[in-house]
Image: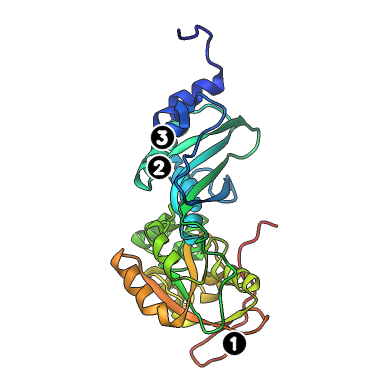
Amino acid sequence: MASDQPASGEDSLIARYFRPIATDPGAFNLDDDAAALRPDGNDVVVTVDAIVEGVHFLSDDPPDTIAHKALRVNLSDLAAKGATPAGFVLTLALRKDDEDWLKPFAAALGEDAMAFGCPLLGGDTVSTPGPLMISVTAFGRVPPGKMVHRSGARPGDRVMVTGTIGDAALGLAVLRGGKVHAATDAAAREALVGRYRVPQPRVTLAEIVRNHASAAMDVSDGLAGDLAKLCRVSGVSAVIEMEHVPLSAAARDLVSRGIVGREMLVAGGDDYEILCTIPDEGVASFEAAAQFVGVAVRSIGTVVDGRFAPKFIDGQGGEIALERLSYSHF
């Protein structure tokens, strides 16, 4: 028999916005203290990312784009590890129970959960007097022992990256006004802001990365800094041809007019592309497989022996000094 006891404010919030999208049987209708992720013989890969108002999104960003970003930054991590999504748990720190914010947020989260095959399994809601914070812990699956690490790059491997680099940093610059906003037309501004607010995780590449890459990670803090992290763990270095770093039409236009430099683009965060190293003999197969699933990939350099920081060189072979490698929280 159903209880006549009134639900708490938190229980009511969960029932209204998140129970309808927690459709996986292992979520137990969000009525229990934990979820169950059914074993299927694969390894479970776990990743967590939090996004914070004023740091990862702006206070006036639409709630649906915030929901998309919160889940997708974690899906990007899973894809770079060669893992297919299995589910996620959500923690929300809210200032108030605001239907005008929560309703589109939950709807967008449900859309992505279905589109990417990553169901909501549970989570927690708390109140905060400070900025909004959304933390997602995502689970993925890989065949036993097949997760792709940062540590496998070897001299001679090609350094590859998906998509385009620097658009999200430019999108944030557009939102902040200033020279980038003034130098772009409405269509370019819309495209760049879209890249900042709504990442495109390369989920379709997960198996391809798993089958081809010697090392991989997603580009979240900036290409230059994230490459340095990968190389450091692998005990190698790299030489990157700056002109081969893929840029969107909007970014190329801004570079060509001297509004921004390529150095700023490779240090900007929030790209959520995949950075990986591929043994030279596997590059053609990797490119063909990526093309088949509709993801652009580009060879931008070579892994080399040594412990020095990766070098970025210009078209004449001269080294480009980077003032900053990536975004850093501290």
Q: Assign a secondary structure to mark 1.
A: loop
List x then y, in percent, for residue 321.
62, 81
Looking at the rendered structure, the kind of residue marked 3 is: Asp
Quadrant occupied by the N terminus: top left
The residue at 51%/46% (across/down) is 138
Quadrant occupied by the C terminus: bottom right
Judge whether residue 5 can be spotted in this image: yes
User: In the rendered view, would you say 171 is above or below 95?
Assistant: below
Furthest-left residue in this view: 292
Image side of residue 141 versus residue 285, left or right? right
As drawn, the label of residue 113 is 2
Image side of residue 233 versus residue 195, left or right? right
As drawn, the label of residue 319 is 1
User: In the rendered view, would you say 60 is above or below 196?
Assistant: above
As drawn, the label of residue 24 is 3
List x then y, in percent, for residue 166.
48, 67
Report the Cα–Cα distance between label 3 and label 2.
Answer: 10 Å
Density class for disc 2 (Cα within 10 Å; few <14, some 14-19, many ≥20) is many
